């Protein structure tokens, strides 16, 4: 994570030197603009609770695994965004992990359980293109976006006294969504976004909802606080040791970011 932040900081510094005439304003700007934003993310990975029903548990190989914790773990996200006029594109890359001791239950026999530990990783890469609809102003914007989301779930299970097994699943979801930006005054701004994806192409279904509050420190630098919630239904439709299934798997949490506008 430290290397990632260092690389992006150096890239931003070089870009500032190379583009001395660039403006920090991105909305309502007819010219090219670039945003680079590294985030520290305090995340939680879990199953969603629905109408009082306990969280859905992940199925990996023969075991039902109760992935989840009330603690927020340190994670990371980096966003790079480029635009010209009403068109823009952005790339998000993030990673979150959760390792914990727990009790596994055999899916074929819920009365048979064993203690052990898991080491679960959730990596995401998102690439979107967006078009701003409605008026073209600096104070607000509504954008429609579409693209793809690459997801990798890596689950390592280690039963007590047994050998570790790994389920490594990767897929790509088509995604469509919208984003709203507004100026709040006194250097504050906010964005809200939501999207849906999967549609049985990668995952069965996924959806995301997020919001961000930003503050302009100096002309090229903002700081922000963001909350993001993402839920996914995935089933690799395999049997035996290769089984991997998670209905309503969730990653969510708070992002603290530095946003460099060029």
Image (cartoon, grey):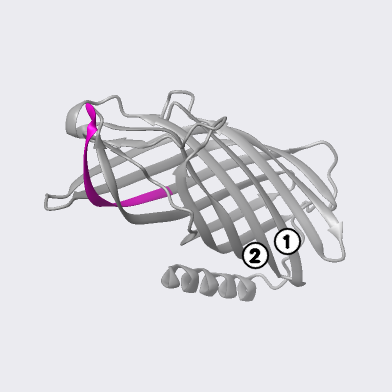
| Crowding near the residue tagged with mark 2, few <14, some 14–19, many ≥20 C-alpha atoms within 10 Å | many
| Crowding near the residue tagged with mark 1, few <14, some 14–19, many ≥20 C-alpha atoms within 10 Å | many
Q: To which residue does mark 2 refer? A: 259
Q: State the image quarter where residue 16 is shown.
A: bottom right
Which of marks 1 and 2 precedes in the sequence? Answer: 1
Task: Classify residue 31 as left or right of residue 234.
Answer: right
Front of the two marks 2 and 1: 1
Residue 109 place in picture, x, y as percent: 22, 28
Is residue 101 shown above or below 49? below
Q: CA distance from mark 2 to mark 1?
A: 9 Å
Q: To which residue does mark 1 refer? A: 214
What secondary structure characterizes most of the magenta part? strand
For the question of whether residue 262 can be seen, the reply is no
- Mark 1 falls on what kind of element? strand
Q: Residue at x 40, y 48 (%)?
A: 122
Residue 108 place in picture, x, y as percent: 22, 26
For the question of whether residue 133 can be seen, the reply is yes
Locate the N terminus and report the quarter of the image it occupies: bottom left
Tally the numbered discs: 2
Q: Front-most of 106 and 74? A: 106
Q: Pointer 2 and pointer 1: residues touching (CB < 8 Å)?
A: yes
Locate the C terminus and report the quarter of the image it occupies: bottom right
Task: Classify residue 194 as left or right of residue 247.
Answer: right
Is residue 153 shown above or below 95? above
Task: Classify residue 11 as left or right of residue 261.
Answer: left
Q: Residue at x 24, y 26 (%)?
A: 238
Is residue 192 shown above or below 198? below
Residue 212 place in picture, x, y as percent: 69, 54
Q: Is residue 24 magenta?
A: no
Q: Residue at x 46, y 37 (%)?
A: 55
Magenta region: 108-123
Residue 35 place in picture, x, y as percent: 63, 60
């Amino acid at each position: 994570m430290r290397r990632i932040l260092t690389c992006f900081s150096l890239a931003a510094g070089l870009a500032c030197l190379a583009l001395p005439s660039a403006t920090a304003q991105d909305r309502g700007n007819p010219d090219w603009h670039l945003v680079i934003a590294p985030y520290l993310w305090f995340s939680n990975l879990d199953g969603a609770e629905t109408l009082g029903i306990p969280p859905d548990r992940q199925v990996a190989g023969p075991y039902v695994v109760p992935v989840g914790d009330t603690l927020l773990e340190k994670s990371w996200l980096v966003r790079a965004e480029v635009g010209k006029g009403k068109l823009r594109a952005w790339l998000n890359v993030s990673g979150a992990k959760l390792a914990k001791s727990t009790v596994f239950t055999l899916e074929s026999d819920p009365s048979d359980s064993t203690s052990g530990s898991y080491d679960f990783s959730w990596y995401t890469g998102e690439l979107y293109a967006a078009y701003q609809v409605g008026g073209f102003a600096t104070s607000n914007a509504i954008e429609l976006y579409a693209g793809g989301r690459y997801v990798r779930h890596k689950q390592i299970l280690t039963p007590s006294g047994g050998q570790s097994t790994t389920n490594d699943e990767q897929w790509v979801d088509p995604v469509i969504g919208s984003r709203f930006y507004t100026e709040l005054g006194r250097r504050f701004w906010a964005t809200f976004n939501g999207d849906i994806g999967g549609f049985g192409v990668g995952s069965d279904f996924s959806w995301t909802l997020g919001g961000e509050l930003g503050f302009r420190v100096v002309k090229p630098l903002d700081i922000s606080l963001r909350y993001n919630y993402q839920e996914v239904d995935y089933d690799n439709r395999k049997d035996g040791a290769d089984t991997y299934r998670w209905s309503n798997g969730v990653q969510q949490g708070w992002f603290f970011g530095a946003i460099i506008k060029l």
